[in-house]
């Protein structure tokens, strides 16, 4: 099993006690595993869940006449959450490094995308770069945090894992297309096809409870992209950012955005996989290319 943090060790002990008291047969074992998976997923989403709660809560309750703009409050709150998670060891420094890198990657893309009018931040703030409030980078960092944490919490193992250099090439192409498609032909269809060719035979094996379960990696990307799309709808409802089509009032984000989030998942996943690979002598540990 993967290394657990101190609190997670305590929670694991409590879960084992609940298992002994609850599990009595196949049905209760299934229910226990299902609930365990949900709890682990929620735990992996801790950073993103707190950020989403701040977005919605501040939209509903933050005073309009507060001396500190709401966006700046969100930036400072995100920094406080990050510091608290590190101080209480709810997050490892390895995970924090992934979040930091993804924060930079996301902020650069935000600066470009707002400049070309893909979306806007309708409120004022002091803590911003080129018109982009600094809390926006934490939205991308939430995705990186989830991938890094769930990798550890669900004890990921992979079979038929693609070479890391090939994944990096795909991720770099995805990132470049987010910029280039404003001036050149959009190659996202080709990127979708490439992702299926690269990851189509790969499986992620995870542990919702005692037993290891397999899932096609591409299916995992799609499912996470779907949940990010749900979160994006809450974020735009809270006017954390607004698409041009939402200028006259909120409406759900187009399902076409699922494709963008799927491609973003590729970047997130490869960043985390690269960290694991670098930390394991280039073989990625449990994520090595030969599926051991």
Image (spheres, rainbow, N blue to C red):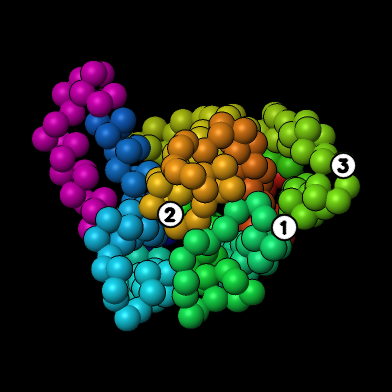
Q: Main secondary structure of the magenta part?
A: helix
Question: Which badge, 3 or 1, is on the more N-terminal residue?
Answer: 1
Element on which disc 1 rests: loop
Query: Image point 52% across, 38% down: which residue?
Result: 253
Q: Is residue 44 above or below residue 229?
A: below
User: Can you see residue 46?
Assistant: no
Of the numbered discs in the image, which one, if any, rests on residue 185? 3
Residue extent of the magenta highlight:
9-31
Element on which disc 3 rests: loop
Question: Which badge, 3 or 2, is on the more N-terminal residue?
Answer: 3
Residue that mark 1 sits on: 116
Q: Nearer the viewer, mark 3 or mark 1?
A: 1
Quick one: which residue is furthest to the right in this view? 184
Side of 182 where 60 appears, left or right = left
Query: Image point 19% across, 36% down: which residue?
Result: 19
Q: Quadrant of the C terminus?
A: top right
Query: Image point 29% across, 74% down: which residue?
Result: 65
Question: Which badge, 1 or 2, is on the more N-terminal residue?
Answer: 1
- How far apart are the two marked residues, 3 and 1, measured between alpha carbons? 16 Å
Side of 106 where 169 appears, left or right = right
Side of 161 where 146 appears, left or right = left
Q: Measured from the top left, where is residue 271 in percent x and y?
A: 64, 57
CB atoms at circles 1 and 2 under 8 Å apart? Answer: no
Element on which disc 2 rests: loop
Of the numbered discs in the image, which one, if any, rests on residue 239? 2
- Crowd class of label 1 (few under 14; some 14 to 19; many from 20; radius 10 Å): few
Q: Is residue 161 above or below residue 69?
A: above
């Amino acid at each position: 099993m993967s290394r657990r943090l101190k609190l997670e060790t305590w929670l694991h002990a409590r879960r084992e006690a609940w298992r002994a008291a609850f599990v009595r047969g196949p049905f209760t074992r299934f229910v226990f595993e299902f609930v365990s998976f949900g709890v682990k997923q929620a735990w992996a989403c801790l950073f993103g869940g707190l950020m989403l709660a701040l977005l919605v809560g501040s939209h509903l309750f933050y005073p309009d006449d507060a001396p500190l703009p709401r966006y700046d409050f969100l930036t400072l709150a995100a920094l406080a959450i990050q510091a608290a998670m590190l101080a209480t060891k709810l997050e490892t420094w390895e995970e924090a490094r992934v979040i930091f890198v993804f924060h930079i990657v996301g902020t650069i893309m935000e600066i470009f995308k707002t400049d070309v009018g893909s979306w806007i931040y309708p409120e004022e703030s002091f803590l911003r770069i080129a018109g982009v409030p600094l809390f926006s980078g934490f939205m991308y960092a939430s995705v990186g945090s989830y991938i890094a944490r769930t990798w550890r919490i669900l004890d990921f193992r992979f079979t038929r894992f693609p070479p890391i250099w090939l994944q990096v090439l795909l991720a770099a192409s995805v990132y470049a297309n987010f910029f280039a498609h404003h001036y050149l032909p959009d190659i996202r269809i080709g990127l979708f096809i490439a992702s299926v060719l690269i990851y189509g035979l790969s499986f992620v094996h995870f542990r919702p409870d005692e037993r290891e379960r397999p899932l096609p990696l591409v299916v995992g990307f799609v499912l996470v992209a779907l949940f990010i799309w749900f979160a994006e709808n809450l974020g735009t409802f809270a006017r954390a950012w607004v698409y041009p089509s939402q200028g006259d009032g909120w409406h759900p984000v187009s399902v076409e955005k699922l494709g963008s989030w799927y491609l973003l998942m590729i970047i997130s996943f490869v960043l985390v996989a690269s960290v694991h690979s670098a930390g394991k002598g280039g073989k990625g540990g449990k994520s090595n290319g030969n599926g051991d």
